Amino acid sequence: MANQERSENKIEQKPSLYDRLGGIYSIATVIDDLIDRVMTDARLNANPAVNEAHHKVPPAGFKYLVTEIRDARCVSLMST
């Protein structure tokens, strides 16, 4: 019984994905590069719906929207 409790505690103490990725600044750096690449990718923009969505807001605004989606999901996951 004690061994089972110890193994359960080890699982609970595992760092979150957020922490394993290095926190907000590391994630922001990756997202910054990713969005710049996505916004200018000819293969993605060949789809009229994607192209339209990419050009409704400038890249900086799109990056902001991505962070808002992330925040909404985090809040949703934390409240369940």
Image: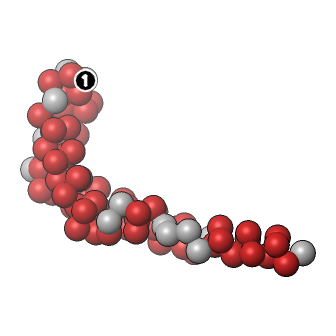
Residue 77 image position (x, y, % from top left): 54, 67
Residue found at x 69% / y 75%:
9
Q: Secondary structure at mark 1?
A: loop
Q: Closest to the observer: 48 or 29?
A: 29
One can see residue 72 in this view: no
Residue 28 image position (x, y, % from top left): 22, 61
Mark 1 neighbour density, 10 Å: few (under 14) some (14–19) many (20 or more): few
Instruction: Indicate the quadrant containing the C terminus: top left, top right, bottom left or bottom right.
Output: bottom right
Residue found at x 75% / y 75%:
6
Residue found at x 56% / y 68%:
14
Residue 65 vs residue 69: left or right?
Answer: left
The relative height of residue 5 versus residue 44 in the rendered view (above or below) is: below
Q: Quadrant of residue 52?
A: top left
Instruction: Indicate the quadrant containing the N terminus: top left, top right, bottom left or bottom right.
Output: bottom right
Display coloring = secondary structure
- Please identify the residue farthest to the front as the structure is shown: 3
Residue 13 image position (x, y, % from top left): 59, 74
The relative height of residue 75 versus residue 44 in the rendered view (above or below) is: below
Residue type at the position of mark 1: Asn
One can see residue 59 in this view: yes
Residue found at x 32% / y 69%:
23
Give the residue at mark 1. Answer: 47
Residue 5 vs residue 53: left or right?
Answer: right
Q: Closest to the observer: 47 or 80?
A: 80
Residue 11 vs residue 32: left or right?
Answer: right
- Please identify the residue farthest to the right as the structure is shown: 1
Question: Count the marks: how many?
Answer: 1
Q: Closest to the observer: 11 or 39?
A: 11
